[in-house]
Image: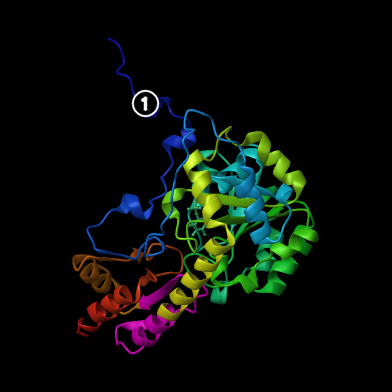
Amino acid sequence: MNKPFSAMDMARENVQLLTPYMSARRLGGNGDVWLNANEYPQAPDFAFTDRNLNRYPECQPADVINRYAAYAGVNPDQVIAGRGADESIELLIRAFCEPGQDAVMYCPPTYGMYSVSAETFGIPQKIVPTLDGWQLDLDSIAANLHGVKLLYVCHPNNPTGNPVREQDLRYLFEIVNNRALIVIDEAYIEFCPQFSVASWLKEYPNLVILRTLSKAFALAGLRCGFTLSSPEIINVLMKVIAPYPLSSPVAAIAAQALLPEGIEVMRERVAENCRNRQMLCDELSKLPLTETIFPSETNYILVRFRESERVFRSLWNDGIILRDQRRQRGLDDCLRITIGTRAECLRVIAAIATLKMP
Ligand SMILES: *Cc1c(COP(=O)(O)O)cnc(C)c1O
């Protein structure tokens, strides 16, 4: 009797055990107000006129790299482009971590892909929860650095919205002392550019910065992100990146988005988003079901509600889809709300205001 074929039994053991990342798209929902993925609420307009789709694209399209380097204030040899910041997270693991041996470290509550990428490749994880105000536990980080190759720090942090204190980031480089790469995930840095550590690349050879066009540039569907680092680290990443990480349409649209006009429009979007965030916070703070609104420097806010289940479910049934964070460490009763258009923010406020306290 032949044994029936089982793909799952054939998969690598750590893949069998893996819980995939539950992206907002996979979680689904049936709404008309989508505030669960930190996307920009309106679609930008781009023209794609390339007639040479029979040809392979450049691996690292020069205009995309040069324009991003100019925007970020670094040299083109300090930039590598790929399929979103998520690809950068994985690329670093593939390039630098020996499976079963080198560890990655991260500090929850934080972005979920550091853990998922490590698990996929069988990389041990050292998890050092943050302290009050979601700041780094530097003593515990120092005590657990043995074997750590990559230390991921989300700055500002998703889903809590706070930047990491500058003196703590400085101290981190001291305690790590070039024994590991420090990866600062700046996915939301356009919403608080004063906190960027891009200028530190001159000082620290082990600094890696992750960037994306998915958030402030309003291009989550494009799948384009960047890694900034020393030319030496970029060269290592170039050895393992896919031969054609950006398709020609992606490269053409990214190049347009990074023209001076594109960057100007992005800055206007950020200013509008911050005004909406302020309005949403002011109005939510007047509602009795709101317990705590955590200060945010990003395009989302984390809110602790009284009766969070009722808030989440009622809005879901109204077609307003938020991101449930209640299973994350330290985030009981917390929901994450992406800042939408002004009208969408008003819908959120009205929907929560109609829920009566019991
Ligand atoms: C959205 C996000 C990413 C992924 O960005 P993509 O470029 O869309 O892959 C990475 N890190 C954080 C913290 C994010 O919130």
Q: Is residue 216 left or right of residue 135?
A: left
In the rendered image, residue 357, in percent from the top left (x then y), is placed at 22, 85
Residue at the image position 57 percent from the left and 72 percent from the top: 192
| Residue nearest the observer in this picture, 243 or 301 | 243
User: Which residue is label 1 attached to?
Assistant: 7
| Residue nearest the observer in this picture, 57 or 91 | 57
Quarter location, residue 57: top right
Q: Is residue 156 visible?
A: no
Quarter location, residue 29: bottom left
- Which amino acid lies under the numbered mark 1 shown in the image of this protein? Ala
Q: Is residue 81 above or below residue 211?
A: above
Q: Is residue 6 above or below residue 255?
A: above
Residue at the image position 63 percent from the left and 68 percent from the top: 137
Instruction: Specify start and end residues of the magenta stretch as a single range.
Output: 277-304
Q: Within the magenta stretch, is there residue 296?
A: yes
In the rendered image, residue 245, in percent from the top left (x then y), is placed at 54, 38
Quadrant showing the C terminus: bottom left
In the rendered image, residue 171, in percent from the top left (x then y), is placed at 74, 68
| Residue nearest the observer in this picture, 62 or 261 | 261
Q: Is residue 76 above or below residue 162?
A: above
- Dot 1 lies on which element? helix
Residue at the image position 41 percent from the left and 64 percent from the top: 40
In the rendered image, residue 277, in percent from the top left (x then y), is placed at 42, 78
Quarter location, residue 74: bottom right
